[in-house]
Amino acid sequence: RLLLRRQVHLLPFCSLSLAARLPTFPHGSYSIRIHVHDVSIFQSGPKAFTSMNPVVHVYALGDTQHTQVCRWSFTAIFDRMLFFSKTLGQEQIRDEVITLAVWNWNFWRPSQLIGSYSFDFLALWNQKDHCFRERWLPLTNTTGNEDDLVGYIRISAVVYGPGIMPVAEHSTH
């Protein structure tokens, strides 16, 4: 018989709880700037639309803002900057979730959800310079039993807080 021996490395004992290992946020005014560049929606799939009038709704810091409606297009260029601001404490900021939802706008009937993407405040805070630039995010529709990929949205986002200096947005064009 061939016996393989592995060395086991024990991790040092850590008495700190998960909350103690997370970054600390001073109480103050936090701002999130989201630049919605464009949306690309698939024309096929289980829920294919015959006409498309996409509009992006962004839910952040207890507020909702939206882009303009782009009529008759599966690929919409919005180039819209949305600003959110709120005074928050340590516990509130950790629970904050940012949601991007793309809706098929209709004048006569209720709008239909095409797809959405959500991320928490910590995901943005932990990025270099507390921002990400021109990132493509998947849009999923969770109306059925499984998540269906229905398209992509390209955004840039940055968060400002107490003592954080604004970062110049670099252009790749």
Image (cartoon, grey):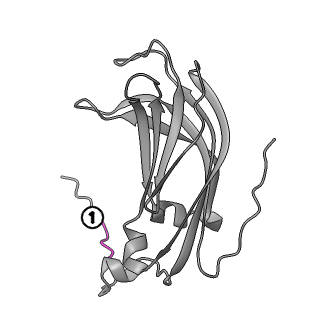
Q: Crowding near pointer 1: few (<14 within 10 Å), some, many (20+)?
A: few
Q: Quadrant of residue 62?
A: bottom left
| Magenta-colored span | 5-9
Instruction: Determine the residue positioned at 42% across, 34% down.
Output: 115
Check disc 1 and give the amino acid type: Arg
Whether residue 82 is situated above or below residue 110 in the rendered picture? below
Secondary structure of the residue carrying tag 1 is: loop
Report the quarter where the C terminus lies: top right
Of 60 and 16, the residue lying toward us: 60
- Rendered location of residue 3, percent (x, y): 22, 58
Q: Is residue 126 visible?
A: no
Instruction: Determine the residue positioned at 30% across, 72% down.
Output: 8
Q: Residue furthest front?
A: 108
Q: Is residue 173 visible?
A: yes
- Rendered location of residue 85, percent (x, y): 55, 66
Instruction: Determine the residue positioned at 78% across, 45% down.
Output: 172
Instruction: Determine the residue positioned at 65% across, 76% down.
Output: 164
On whether residue 149 falls in the magenta region, the answer is no
- Rendered location of residue 65, percent (x, y): 52, 49
Determine which residue is flagged by label 1: 5
For the stretch drawn in magenta, the main secondary structure is: loop
Q: Residue furthest top?
A: 50
- Rendered location of residue 4, percent (x, y): 26, 59
Whether residue 59 is situated above or below residue 47 in the rendered picture? below
